[in-house]
Image (cartoon, coloured by chain):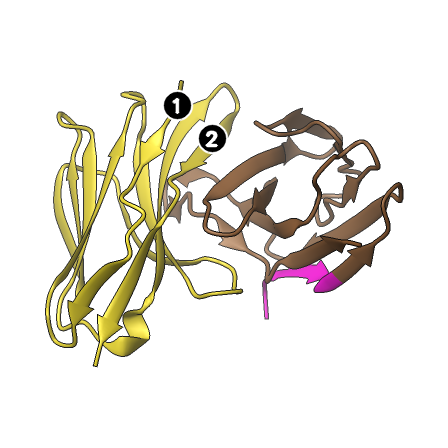
Chain colours: A brown, B yellow
Amino acid sequence: DGGITQSPKYLFRKEGQNVTLSCEQNLNHDAMYWYRQDPGQGLRLIYYSQIVNDFQKGDIAEGYSVSREKKESFPLTVTSAQKNPTAFYLCASSMGSGGANTGELFFGEGSRLTVL
Amino acid sequence: QKEVEQNSGPLSVPEGAIASLNCTYSDRGSQSFFWYRQYSGKSPELIMFIYSNGDKEDGRFTAQLNKASQYVSLLIRDSQPSDSATYLCAVNSERNYGQNFVFGPGTRLSVLP
């Protein structure tokens, strides 16, 4: 079955530690995204990547880093510079619009990060 | 400044009624519009998408788009308790070589048995 796999589902981090959230997709999508969601709020874009070896900062990139070495993978590192990292992190991918493509985002199941 | 606005709710409707969810957006270059449903603690799932002005129906769901008014809505007919969730409006405009989705804060819907 095609889809997006995020791991781990739950993660606890001590202050000052870097952590990396994994995101893998087998949908053959070019574009991948990382969003952050805080309780009762919408999704805010952290980083996105349209093609391999290229990525762009979103609205709240400070304290985060990403890489896109393979089309299927887009890991997110939450660094110690991120002051308030406790949140629900969502990875998404899309093929793009045009033709038969709807341009919709497909989401992984999310990773919940808690800083102790 | 790109913005998508929604009433945060909660919007409460009795079972069997019509739920009406509204969304306004500021970017006139927006081209496609999506409604996602998100259950508590889960990831969003696509309910409807719409590109053209007018109505689009899919089962109990109808999406309505008015680009002149920069307004998109979702109607849920015969609401069920299982429809209780947060509904996210997302607006997409293509910039340069890619897409840029902007999400509203979501409207929490509660369908009362």
Nearest the eye: A6 or A69 = A6
- Could you tell me which secondary element the residue under label 2 belongs to? strand
Q: Position of residue A58 (x, y in %)?
A: 59, 28
Q: Would residue B19 be visible to someone looking at this image?
A: yes
Query: On residue B2, which mark appears?
Result: 1
Nearest the eye: A81 or A106 = A81
Q: Residue at x 39, y 23 (%)?
A: B2
Q: Would residue A8 be visible to someone looking at this image?
A: no
Residue B12's image quarter? bottom left
Find disc 2 in the rendering and name its residue.
B100
Q: Which residues are magenta?
A: A1-10
Q: In the drawing, does residue B89 fall left or right of residue B23?
A: right
The amino acid type found where label 2 is placed reads Asn
Q: Residues within 10 Å of mark 1 (few under 14, many from 20)?
A: few
Q: Are marks 2 and 1 in contact (CB under 8 Å)?
A: yes
Q: Position of residue A29 (x, y in %)?
A: 58, 47
**Is A53 above or below relative to A26?**
above
Q: Position of residue B81 (x, y in %)?
A: 27, 77
Q: Residues within 10 Å of mark 2 (few under 14, many from 20)?
A: some
Residue B103's image quarter? top left
How far apart in space, not on screen, are marks 2 and 1 (Cα)?
10 Å
**Is B82 above or below relative to A106?**
below
Residue A74's image quarter? top right
Q: In the drawing, does residue A37 fall left or right of residue A25?
A: left
Check residue A61 for magenta coloring: no
Check residue A5 for magenta coloring: yes
